[in-house]
Amino acid sequence: MMKLKDLLNYLESSVPPAFQESYDNSGLQVGNAESNVDSVLLSLDVTEEIIDEADSKGCRLIISHHPLIFQPLKSISGKTPVERIITKAILKNISVYSMHTNLDIIRGGVSYRMAEMLGLNDIEVLAPLGNKLLKLVVFVPLSYASKLREAIFDAGAGHIGNYDRCSFNIKGEGTFRAGPAADPFAGEPGREHTEEEVRIETVLPAHIKSRVLKAMIDAHPYEEVAYDLYSIENSIPGAGLGCVGILDDEIRDTGLIKKLGEVFEAEGIRHTATVGRKIKKLAVMGGSGGSFIGKAISSGADAFVSSDLKYHSFFEADRRILLADIGHYESEKPALGILHELITKKFPKFAVRFSEINTNPVNYSQVWKK
């Protein structure tokens, strides 16, 4: 048994809500973060049947990939499916939390899992996440440099890919004159002072800015902390939408279509014409990837696997790339495995259950064949 907020704090430190796309609504949809939970049901979607399943299994928490609430609600009267689901969740005391595009975007997210399932090597991000990093520059007395670095690193700064506690340091001299009302760490009011200082530079995700700045100020000996904060265009290593990788052995386009059906249990795959093309480099994206066809082509991929591709998107391929639409539900099922691993890694004794209900609203029937 634990407080829901303790589980959510861990999840949000690993999969920051700040990484989600602007249109998204990841986060706590229904429930009180102060409530107690001892088990969770994982599901791609939240339906009335999923609420009933969670209740029957004693799960007071559902974590879904797709948010229950996408559009603003003006009332909860039971007129719409979403309103009925919310009402049922509240009456049964079941909290609902969703991790959507932020789970797509993080390092090792949904698309990366798809790439792993297909056995791709040398996996790289198709559309890296940019404009989410800040550079912090702070000036501190030499004797306090180690303490201050420790504080800002512990607060989350200094991560670059597989490395942490990253910084650049330059020794120099800082000058200042304390005013009459000041209580300076060094020097005397009214007299110019020179102090041996260190310029410390590091990077941090923008969403933890307040936490890092607080840690910096608390660890700094000066009354007035001299620091600079810059927005930088660097992408976060490994984070972004979609992935590109290399197959061990090249495969014909018809063979790839068959492989996709087997790996993702896709009952129906829409694709461009199979012309015997050899596939070696493959781009994948969980969810709706139609707007990333151009990036897939630019990456040099021989094929792009995603879902929700529009009719005219198949023309866009123009024989430059094989497009394969495996279905939205099918492309995002890997999200549940990521969530299971994420939770059990930190809380091995916490009960994590997979939903046994197929929430895919799309059905396939072969009613005519030439």
Image (cartoon, grey):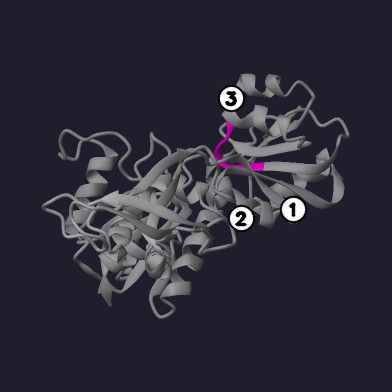
Check disc 3 and give the amino acid type.
Lys
Give the quarter of the image for residue 116: bottom right
Left or right side of 73 for 296? right
Q: Which residue is mark 1?
A: 122
Left or right side of 315 for 130? left
**Residue at 46% from the left image edge and 73% from the top image edge:** 344
Q: Residues within 10 Å of mark 3 (few under 14, many from 20)?
A: some
- Whether tag 2 and tag 3 are in contact, CB under 8 A, the answer is no
Name the N-terminal-most of marks 2 and 3.
2
Q: Secondary structure at mark 1?
A: strand
Q: Where is residue 110 shown, x and y percent of the image?
A: 55, 51
Check disc 2 and give the amino acid type.
Arg
Q: CA distance from mark 2 to mark 3?
A: 24 Å
Q: Which residue is mark 2?
A: 113
Q: Which residue is mark 3?
A: 310
| Residue 66 seen in the figure | no
Check disc 1 and give the amino acid type.
Asp
Q: Nearer the viewer, residue 40 or 136?
A: 136
Question: Any magenta on residue 160?
Answer: no
Q: CA distance from mark 2 to mark 1?
A: 13 Å
Q: Secondary structure at mark 3?
A: loop
Quarter of the figure that contains the N terminus: bottom left
Give the quarter of the image for residue 31: bottom left
